[in-house]
Image: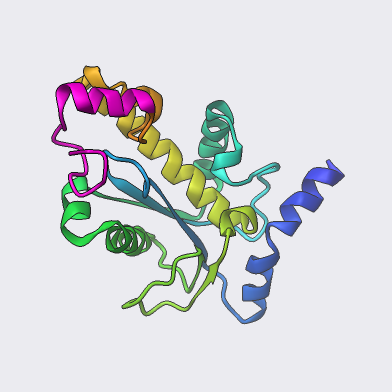
């Protein structure tokens, strides 16, 4: 138990620093899906309580699917607010993946109620936003709030890709979630792109 508490406290370091500046509603912001060849980019923003009591929380990439699902429900239960936003492959093709990522993050923040007074963002620097923020490199490894956002975004996007797999059974989206695996690239060569593929990405066309 002491080890869990120490680990969790380490992941609250940035949150504690920001609270000392007078901010209380601190949202972690992260995205999932910049690299895939298909499907949307999904962003999440999460405001956790001062002491969230979610032992073992970490970057979603370091968790198994079952562990992410477990944390997903804990975060839903304990978060003060959660905002989710998805930007489609068509918009990604129109404005590019970086701008689409920024758009998804800003939309996720706007969906928070109550609104945050500070943001901790995984690496990305946002423009045209009137909320003070800190961009933290590899923030999903350093901040519980960002880790929570990464988990929410990952679970929601994976679930969406599993739903889309039923619409496009030849592409096995439930396995690779749209990433450019050998099997996915082979399916593209054989069957061509679907309506959810990112036509501006290399390897799709």
- On the image, the x and y values in percent for residue 192 come to 15, 28
15 relative to 4 in the view: left or right: left
36 relative to 140 in the view: left or right: left
Asked if the magenta segment contains residue 13, the reply would be no
Q: Please provide the residue range marked out in magenta.
A: 182-205
Q: Is residue 120 above or below residue 23?
A: above
84 relative to 22 in the view: left or right: left
Which image quadrant for residue 107? Answer: bottom left
Name the residue furthest right. 2
Q: Is residue 157 above or below residue 181?
A: below
155 relative to 71 in the view: left or right: left
Q: Residue at x 68, y 47 (%)?
A: 53
Q: Is residue 179 above or below residue 5?
A: above
- The N terminus - image quarter: top right
**Depth check, front residue: 102 or 116:** 102
- On the image, the x and y values in percent for residue 47 come to 51, 58
């Amino acid at each position: 138990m002491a080890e869990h508490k120490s680990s969790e406290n380490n992941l609250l370091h940035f949150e504690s620093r920001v609270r000392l500046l007078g901010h209380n509603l601190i949202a972690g912001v992260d995205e999932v899906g910049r690299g895939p060849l298909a499907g949307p980019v999904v962003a999440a923003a999460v405001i956790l309580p001062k002491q969230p009591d979610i032992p073992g929380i970490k970057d979603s990439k370091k968790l198994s699917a079952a562990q992410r699902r477990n944390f997903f429900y804990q975060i839903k239960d304990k978060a003060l607010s959660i905002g989710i936003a998805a930007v489609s492959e068509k918009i990604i093709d129109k404005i590019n993946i970086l701008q689409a990522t920024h758009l998804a993050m800003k939309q996720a923040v706007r969906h928070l109620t109550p609104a945050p007074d500070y943001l901790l963002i995984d690496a990305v620097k946002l423009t045209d936003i009137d909320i003070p923020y800190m961009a933290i490199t590899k923030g999903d490894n350093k901040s519980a709030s960002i880790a929570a956002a990464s988990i929410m975004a990952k679970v929601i996007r994976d679930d969406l890709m599993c739903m889309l797999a039923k619409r496009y059974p030849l592409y096995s989206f439930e396995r690779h979630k749209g990433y450019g695996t050998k099997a996915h690239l082979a399916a593209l060569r054989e069957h061509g792109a679907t309506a959810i593929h990112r036509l501006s990405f290399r390897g799709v066309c």
